[in-house]
């Protein structure tokens, strides 16, 4: 059974393993040196040398993996921040193109974030009827019939051309159950 670890916990696990390997290597090293000094003629301490060496090599590889993982996570976080900023710019430009008022832009953004009418009304300290009216005006200006089409307007741009449609990857039964 594969072990699934979230990306945020992976470096911590690797660092923990690195620490465990370091402790074991130090133990075998000092234990072997101690036995060798106490009993210079015995061969047993020499059998621990390959173990300590293996642990040392493991430490080097684990440290390299931790470094690569942290670097990859930093790059991904930077790319995500850049994508969020660009997506926010696209949304703001589209809102301006539609001529949304400040209040409509706020309501539209909350709707895109998945909030329902009651949640938007609470967040804006407005009546639910006011929010419904604003959403109706937003949808009319956007030329869509409701929230799903409104959200899809923005998601459509994120989908890459040539992406495999769900119908090509889902079994027929899964599609008929939907």
Image: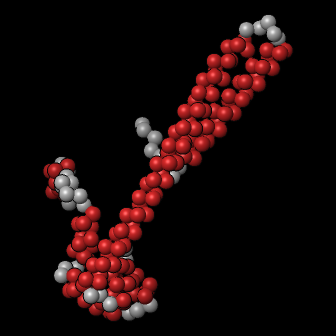
Q: Is residue 8 left or right of residue 31?
A: left
Q: Quadrant of the N terminus?
A: top left
134 or 163, nearer to the observer: 163
In this rendering, position of residue 21 left or right of residue 94? right
Q: Report whether residue 128 is seen.
A: no
Residue 69 appears in the figure = yes
Relative to 108, 44 lies left or right: right
Is residue 41 placed above or below 51 in the rendered structure?
Answer: above
**Quarter of image, res 4:** top left
Which quarter of the picture shows residue 120? bottom left
Say which of 97 and 155 sits in front. 97
The x, y position of residue 15, in whole percent, is 60, 42
Q: Residue at x 57, y 47 (%)?
A: 12
Identify the coloring: secondary structure
Query: How far from the left and from the top, in percent, is residue 144?
Result: 19, 79
Q: Residue at x 64, y 36 (%)?
A: 20
Count of numbered labels shown in the rendering? 0
Specify the farthest residue to the top: 41
The answer to whether residue 22 is above or below residue 100 is above
Give the residue furthest to the right.
Answer: 38
Question: Residue, x 22% and y 86% (percent of image)?
Answer: 141
State which quarter of the image contains the C terminus: bottom left
Identify the residue at horizontal 50%, vertical 43% (top origin): 68
Question: Could you tell me residue 140's position as x and y percent?
Answer: 20, 86
* Relative vertical location of residue 84 with respect to residue 31 in this rendering, above or below: below
């Amino acid at each position: 059974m594969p072990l699934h670890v979230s990306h945020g916990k992976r470096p911590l696990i690797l660092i923990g393993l690195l620490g465990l390997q370091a402790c074991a290597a130090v133990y075998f090293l000092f234990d072997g040196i101690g036995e060798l000094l106490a009993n210079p003629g015995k061969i047993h301490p020499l059998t621990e040398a390959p173990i300590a060496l293996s642990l040392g090599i493991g430490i080097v590889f684990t440290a390299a993996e931790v470094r690569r993982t942290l670097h990859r996570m930093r790059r991904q976080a930077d790319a995500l921040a850049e994508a969020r900023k660009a997506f926010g710019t696209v949304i703001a430009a589209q809102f301006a193109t539609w001529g949304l008022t400040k209040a409509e832009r706020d309501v539209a953004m909350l709707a895109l974030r998945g909030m329902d009418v009651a949640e938007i009304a609470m967040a804006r300290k407005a009546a639910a009827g006011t929010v419904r009216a604003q959403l109706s005006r937003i949808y009319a200006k956007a030329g869509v019939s409701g929230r799903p089409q409104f959200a899809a307007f923005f998601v459509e741009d994120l989908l890459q051309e040539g992406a495999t449609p769900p119908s090509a990857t889902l079994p027929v039964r899964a599609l008929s159950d939907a």
